[in-house]
Amino acid sequence: MSDTERDAGTQGFPTEAREPASETLGGVPDEHRGADGGSHAGLMYSSRQVQRARELLTRLYAVRRTARFYPIDHPATADGVRSLKAVIDRYHEEGVDVELAFFEGELLLGEQLLPEDSILFDQLIRELTGIGAGSLVFRKGLTLDELSRSVLVLAADSFEVEQNGGLKRMASEAGLSHVEVGAVRVYEQPPSDTAESAEAAREAYTGALELVREIDALIRRNKVVSSGRVKGVVRSLVDNVLSNRYAMLELAGLKSYDEYTFYHSANVAILGLALGSMVSNDYRFMSSLGTGALLHDIGKMTVGLEVLNKPGALTAEEWALVRQHPVRGAEQAAAIPGLDRSAIVIILEHHMRFDGSGYPSRTPRRLQHLSSRIVAIADAYDAMTSRRSYSAARVQDEAMGLLAQSAGTAVDPTLSRMFVSMLGVYPPRSVVRLSNGHTAIVVRPGGGDITRPVVRVIADADGNMLESRDVDLSEETALTIGRSLDPATLNIDVDEFL
Ligand SMILES: [Fe+2]
């Protein structure tokens, strides 16, 4: 068994990872949607309004079909439009717009992910995203006539959309003012880096580490952790990722050679949640994702360290044992009463690959769940940038490059692009050499350009330490980053400067 097959951090990521995800995304009551989760754009709907979405989608699906075969003034089409309008009106009468979003095969109403409807309306989602409709909003004040015109736009196929200069242009030419058809939306959180938020982030991180240590000790004694304890820790992680994202991302670069599994679990939870928050801020989605990410490797806790940390190649038996850890972990998680069921799916699927390979093998070859695809990326990145007994750590930009290379094979291409744009090519804690020869540490992503973060300059071109100062490379355009450096070789303790 070669090292290539053993770890995401060895010999190129696009092979099986040695380190290296839902049906329903339920489990946490609605009252847990705290003020933190509500600080972003996006409507929250009542459970009745969420249930009604199925009727709306059924009617939307039907009228698009009808409009392809009959003119818009044909009785069948006109009936379809009226029927769709009746459901939309009910939302408007209740004082809310209808905000639908489609992302990666998943459907959202406002910020709420609709897992069952995502499966039921798979074809509708694919067709709409296929013509570039990543989101669809029906605003109050919509008339029957405007809805008819919007149905005509939405019923176009990708060829017609291209011929007519894109969906946006078609919508504008149809004079739509209460119907918005947009590209895929991506949430962006504002930066927050106060001392208080850094402290809260550190507490959440420490809480996650302690929990994983505790689970490890319990599993070794054949005992299970309480799901309430897990929910508390995950809630703190979710809240902090939503409100203190940069502080959390900086912590996600912490490593421990001796306690690799514990730090790795906490890092994967933060990186996974940060990526997940760009897709949806729905608390139930985030909570399931955080739980699955934090517990993704619990199946390894019963595999001996002599195997996990073996410097040389694994024997066939040892490799077989390692490959069992997703199934074993899912079983261990299933034994925790009250644990979020969808987190179990994440644990089971985290070593599956986007192209259908990976382990455990799946028949039929269905796509991993969205949350599993998110965790797989976070897992691979953290594993690649960690030093192990059988492999050196990769510098961050190299890991980012490998991740980009494996887009579409090992990992989901859209999510991998979002991950790179989230962390930047040079993620926080990267040690870099600037174009003027100075050495600096990346503090946080910059203003939009993934290659120009905010850096803390620590040494001049001759290696003399400087009084550290922060430079925003998105403003100081004369300076660029030359390359990433390995802090271990330079004998730099990154924490000293953060
Ligand atoms: Fe794993």
Image (cartoon, grey):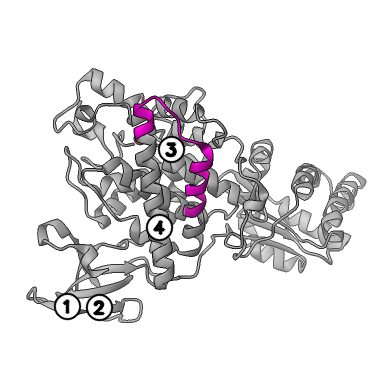
C-beta proximity under 8 Å, tags 1 and 2:
yes
The earlier-in-sequence mark between 1 and 3 is 3
Task: Tell me the kind of residue under disc 1.
Answer: Asn
Q: Would you name the residue on which mark 1 appears?
A: 436
Q: Position of residue 262 (x, y in %)?
A: 32, 43
For the residues bearing labels 2 and 4, Cβ distance under 8 angstroms: no
Residue under numbered circle 4? 203
Question: As drawn, is 162 to the left or to the right of 392?
Answer: right
The quadrant of the picture occupied by the N terminus is top left
Q: Which residue is mark 2?
A: 479
Q: Which residue is mark 3?
A: 354
User: Quick one: label 2 or label 3, which is nearer the N terminus?
Assistant: 3
Q: How many marks?
A: 4
Element under disc 1: loop
Asked if labels 1 and 4 touch by Cβ distance under 8 angstroms, the answer is no
Q: Are marks 4 and 3 in contact (CB under 8 Å)?
A: no
Secondary element at tag 2? loop
Q: Main secondary structure of the magenta part?
A: helix
Q: Nearer the viewer, mark 4 or mark 3?
A: 4
Q: Amino acid at mark 4?
A: Glu
Q: Nearer the viewer, residue 443 or 395?
A: 443
Considering only vertical position in the picture, is 463 above or below 478?
above
Front: mark 2 or 4: 4
* Labels 4, 1: front one: 4
Q: Which residues are magenta?
A: 217-236
- Residue 166: image x %, image y %? 62, 61
- CA gap between label 2 and label 4 equals 36 Å
Q: Residue at x 80, y 59 (%)?
A: 149
Say whether residue 248 is visible.
no
Marks 1 and 2, how far apart in space?
Answer: 7 Å
Identify the mark nearer the N-term, 4 or 3. Answer: 4
